[in-house]
Image: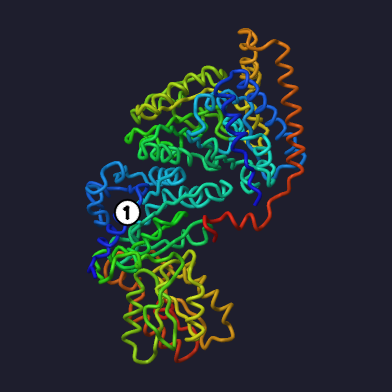
């Protein structure tokens, strides 16, 4: 067992894939000499040299586009987008070029590019450096999107992403880079894309969580004496593990998604819609989504702490749902 | 899915324009006639959506193809019919794709703006201005990292020099000394707008100086000049000398797309450019040099027309793609 921090697990996953396959290269801003602003590429330049591990200009459209072109012609690039917001200036290359190129080549070209980006609130970085933004990518055919919830899942998802023949985005919760976890970093730890994981069995409610909310959902489930929750780390949202969620809800008869994103358009909408359609008659309560309000991520500790669903808020929402069988009011509906 | 297997034909057609000036002339005529036919059958409702033709720019297309190898990678824009044909993509798969039929180079799923044929290095042409510039830099990066002598080429219009991707891509290519040639077809108009109304410089090649990159301006109506300029840039790239920006001064005879009647052009401008039509110029030169007889020019024209009619018949007999073909192409390895 290795007790790795999440940033170490990421660097290890990339290093192992670069060792295994000489076509794997990595580039991004300050990832080579400085080893990454979040130390997610520690040791890579030393181990693999400046041809395969490259610092880029602050030029996401340029280097993400170059990654797409390199992927279409024989390399397997891993690119780092330092903060997910920076993807905005490069989105064309990901969704309109990379995700369409297989289709637009009559299936003859593949684009095995891995785009990693740090996401999430909780570090006081203000609204332009704290979003998760996975919803920008949802519903883009040809793209896969995974979200790491800690060292073990980051390791397993990144390895799977690098090996995949399609463009894959792996989002990494920034506040978890320093978190440690005991796990065996080996082949068995590779996580197939599209497969979620039941982290805790339960009988009264299924909580589907992602990224930063996974730990919070587990904490709420472990603390609750009133209900027993099954907690699922969804891990991949494009494609998402329908079988796993459906099977869990058919047992618990209640579904709650816990999302870091704002309410409108969040990843949970697809899950709730699917379960509401498929299991309509079997549910003991309406499926609900616990999310942030439709507001920019606030600056300043007090407000930012309210943005991300807290363990206490989650617990109250679920308790109310189970007791009353109706959708509880959101905190901003009650207070404002 | 019935994949059009055209590797051999594509390679033969490419070899033609690389080694033989008569073939270059024939290919220029082929491009002109196909583009004219596209406009004709668009009006008849045989082409969905819209389409962007390149009459007047044939010398750039063929000059680029003549100076490169089929193993080189070419990235181009939606005005790509001419480049695709010049590189060797068979006429039936180009017209088939434009018309959205299974026989098209992408099975009819891409359309006029999205042509591709990996067997001659053509990556899918893009409908997004500027997108191909970083992609070409990336293809050149592959060659540099794998250590082969492949060169990447990005062909784009004058309007592209005003978008961010152009500047980011040129800078990246320069700092990494990538084996890539950027070919700007300056056809004087970005969609409906004359270049001088949208752009701070007259000679677009000057923008290479910002990136410490060599550049050349070439007469885009002269296929020999384009080929020679291209050959110098390709040789520089292949030998590790880094990227080049080429500006080919040319002209787009038709409007931007089919809704554009090009009424914004000053009187006499088109006529002035028609005096220097690239096909007439090259034909006259080949006759003068004794490569062709005067009578050959009409024979080439008649032969290309005959072939195009046969090609159109073949395309019309091909079905449109099925839902199953569409679904199968979304992700590699299935959905």
A247 or A93: nearer the viewer? A247
**Residue B50, picture quadrant:** top right
- Does the image show residue B175? yes
What chain is tagged by disc 1? A
Query: Residue B179: where, in percent of width, then height?
Result: 39, 32
> What secondary structure is found at the residue carrying circle 1?
strand
Q: Which quarter of the rendering shows the N terminus of chain A?
A: bottom left
Residue A147, position in %: x, y?
39, 65
Task: Give the residue drawn at x 41%, y 41%.
Answer: B138
At 68% across and 41% down in the image, what residue appears? B96
User: Total number of numbered labels?
Assistant: 1
x and y percentages locating residue B156 in the rendered image: 51, 33
In the figure, is residue B184 to the left or right of A232? right
Left or right: A327, with A176 as reference point: right
Residue A14 relative to residue B312: left or right: left
The residue singled out by tag 1 in the image is A82
Residue B292 lies in quadrant: top right
- Foreground of the two, A325 or A147: A147
Q: Can residue A336 be seen in this view?
A: no
- In percent of width and height, residue B167 lies at 40, 36
């Amino acid at each position: 067992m290795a007790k790795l921090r999440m940033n170490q697990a990421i660097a290890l996953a990339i290093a192992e894939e670069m060792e295994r396959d000489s076509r794997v290269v990595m580039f991004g801003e300050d990832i080579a000499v400085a080893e990454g602003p979040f130390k997610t590429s520690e040791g890579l330049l030393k181990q693999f040299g400046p041809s395969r591990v490259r610092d880029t200009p602050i030029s996401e459209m340029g280097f993400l586009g170059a990654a797409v072109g390199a992927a279409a012609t024989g390399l397997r690039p891993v690119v780092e987008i330092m903060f997910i917001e920076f993807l905005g200036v490069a989105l064309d290359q990901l969704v309109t070029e990379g995700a369409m190129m297989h289709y637009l080549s009559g299936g003859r070209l593949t684009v095995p590019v891995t785009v990693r980006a740090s996401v999430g609130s909780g570090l006081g970085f203000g609204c332009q450096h704290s979003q998760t933004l996975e919803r920008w990518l949802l519903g883009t055919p040809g793209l896969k999107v995974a979200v790491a919830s800690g060292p073990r899942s980051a390791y397993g998802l990144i390895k799977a992403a690098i090996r995949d023949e399609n463009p894959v985005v792996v989002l990494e919760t920034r506040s978890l880079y320093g978190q440690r976890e005991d796990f065996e970093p080996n082949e068995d730890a590779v996580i197939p894309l599209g497969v979620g994981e039941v982290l805790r069995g339960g009988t009264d409610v299924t909580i589907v969580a992602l990224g930063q909310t996974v730990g919070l959902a587990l904490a709420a489930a472990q603390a609750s004496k009133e209900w027993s929750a099954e907690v699922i780390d969804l891990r991949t949202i494009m494609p998402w593990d329908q079988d796993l969620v459906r099977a869990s809800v058919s047992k618990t008869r209640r579904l709650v998604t816990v999302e870091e994103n704002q309410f409108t358009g969040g990843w949970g909408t697809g899950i709730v819609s699917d379960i509401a359609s498929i299991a309509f008659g079997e549910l003991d309560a309406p499926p609900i989504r616990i999310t942030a309000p439709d507001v920019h991520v606030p600056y300043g500790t007090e407000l930012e702490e309210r943005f991300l669903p807290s363990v206490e808020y989650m617990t109250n929402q679920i308790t109310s749902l189970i007791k009353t069988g109706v959708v509880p009011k959101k905190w901003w509906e009650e207070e404002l | 899915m019935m994949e059009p297997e055209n590797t051999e034909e594509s390679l033969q057609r490419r070899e033609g324009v690389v080694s033989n000036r008569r073939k270059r002339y024939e290919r220029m005529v082929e491009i002109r006639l196909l583009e004219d036919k596209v406009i004709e059958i668009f009006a008849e409702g045989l082409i969905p959506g819209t389409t962007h033709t390149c009459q007047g720019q044939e010398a750039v297309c063929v000059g680029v193809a003549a100076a490169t190898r089929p193993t080189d990678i070419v990235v181009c824009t939606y005005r790509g019919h001419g480049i695709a044909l010049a590189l060797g993509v068979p006429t039936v798969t180009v017209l088939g794709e434009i018309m959205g039929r299974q026989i098209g180079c992408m099975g009819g799923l891409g359309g006029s703006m999205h042509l591709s044929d990996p067997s001659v290095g053509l990556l899918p042409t893009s409908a997004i201005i500027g997108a191909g510039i970083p992609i070409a830099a990336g293809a050149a990066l592959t060659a540099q990292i794998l250590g082969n002598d492949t060169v990447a080429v990005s062909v784009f219009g004058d309007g592209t020099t005003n978008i961010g991707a152009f500047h980011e891509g040129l800078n990246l290519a320069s700092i990494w000394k990538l084996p890539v040639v950027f070919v700007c077809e300056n056809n004087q108009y970005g969609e409906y707008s004359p270049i001088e109304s949208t752009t701070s410089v007259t000679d677009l090649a000057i923008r290479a100086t910002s990136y410490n990159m060599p550049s050349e301006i070439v007469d885009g109506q002269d296929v020999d000049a384009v080929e020679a300029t291209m050959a110098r840039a390709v040789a520089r790239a292949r030998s590790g000398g880094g990227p080049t920006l080429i500006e080919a001064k040319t002209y787009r005879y038709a409007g931007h797309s089919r809704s554009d009647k090009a009424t914004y052009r000053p009187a006499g401008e088109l006529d002035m450019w028609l005096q220097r039509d690239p096909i007439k110029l090259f034909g006259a030169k080949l006759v003068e040099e004794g490569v062709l007889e005067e009578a050959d020019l009409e024979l080439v024209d008649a032969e290309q027309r005959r072939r195009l009619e046969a090609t159109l018949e073949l395309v019309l007999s091909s079905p449109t793609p099925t839902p199953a073909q569409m679904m199968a192409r979304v992700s590699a390895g299935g959905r």
